[in-house]
Image: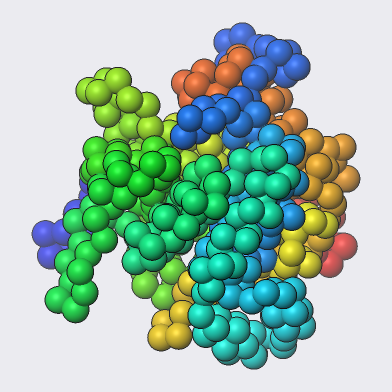
Amino acid sequence: MAFFIGRDKEARRAYGFDEVSIVPGNITVDPEDTDTTVDFCGYKLRVPMIASAMDGVVDTKMAAELGKLGALGVLNLDGIYTRYKNPYEQIEKIVTATDDKATEIIQQIYKEPVKEDLIYERIKEIKKEKVLCAVSTVPQNAPKYIKIAKEAGADIFVIQATVVTVKHYSSKYGCVDLEKICKESGLPVVVGNCVTYKVALELMEIGACAVLVGVGPGAACTTRQVLGIGVPQITATVDCAKARDFYFKKTGRYVPIVTDGGMITSGDICKSFVAGADLVMFGSGFAKAKEAPGKGYHWGMAMPHFYLPRGARIYVGTTGTLKEILFGPSKTDDGTQNLVGALKTCMGNVGAKTIKELQLAQLIIAPEIKTEGKRYQKEQKVGMGK
């Protein structure tokens, strides 16, 4: 339903994670009998969760650990690890910077050019651990980097920007032919980000093997504040999943939808799948792992931009090992650990044995769901100074 807001403009109501809730099913399933395995770009992932291509979240060691646990980490080819032989010296500068200097220091660090030999070297480091290797870059670097990535043995190539469309106009430079890259590169290509049915469908039509959904919802992203653009993740996921379903009926080719960003708890992850996601991607949840290179700090991908930064450095803390965050046992009660266990339990409560069945569960609009009857929890947190 659309509402008129004046000047003949319509505004559609959209929904985020905190405004909806999942309805329990008519039958239930033992969580041990559920299967979270998904197909992604020709590969099977036991854990349908991807760590974002952010320098405070994924380095080569983190990518290897994620792969061994059944998930996937994406390495940023435009980041610190391909600019510096010893990237950890630069990370130390970032995590020790004062709040008022953090953006400036990050901008200086990222002025160092990317070295193509380091792209090759980092991919080799990941592949040496016998896990899937996924790497990411911005569209303008994709034609050059994808050749190096393929030669080095990468398995999945991600082309990612704040907003990606098939149709792009510029009077100053030639546009990247995304369709040519998708169909002729020889690697599965994931493309994003988008939030609408039309763009998601067009990205599928040019050959993307998966589509990233989300503009500005990430914890370290300030795009929504700086540019004023974005669509809440539940609505964005529903719309893009509808495009996926239409495209599948039309062509027989299934293109997974990846809800990217905005998830704070395991409940948000579960809601993403019910909204239609095949996988989820996030950064802050993984940045809390002891293995994360950012040492509890997390910074936005567009933060280093020399002209208009659209990210922030935030402190999320270190709460446990990567294994604890994914599989428990959980030492927290806030839905930030044992994410897979929470997902399987949710699946059991709605009667879904697989992720595809979970997508069929019902959502309701319930903006008070997180606070109803929770007065004592709120009072306790206030008393503890949280």
Residue furthest toward the top? 27
Residue at position x 63%, y 25% in the image: 36
Specify the quadrant of the image occupied by residue 290.
Answer: bottom right
Q: Is residue 152 visible?
A: yes
Name the side, left or right, on which 218 lies relative to 212.
right
Of the pair 67 and 283, the residue shown nearer to us: 67
Q: Considering the image in quadrants, where does the N terminus appear?
A: top left
Of the pair 49 and 218, the residue shown nearer to us: 49
Name the side, left or right, on which 213 lies relative to 350.
left
Residue furthest toward the left? 8
Residue at position x 74%, y 64% in the image: 293
Residue 63 at x, y percent in the picture:
68, 50
Specify the quadrant of the image occupied by residue 176.
Answer: bottom left
Q: Is residue 288 visible?
A: no
Residue at position x 57%, y 60% in the image: 120
Residue 106 at x, y percent in the picture:
60, 82
Residue 133 at x, y percent in the picture:
59, 46
Residue at position x 25%, y 23% in the image: 251
Residue 243 at x, y percent in the picture:
29, 34
- Determine whether 334 is above or below 249 in the image: below
- Determine whether 116 is above or below 103 in the image: above
Specify the quadrant of the image occupied by residue 353.
Answer: top right
Name the side, left or right, on which 21 lies relative to 339.
left
> How many numbered markers are drawn?
0
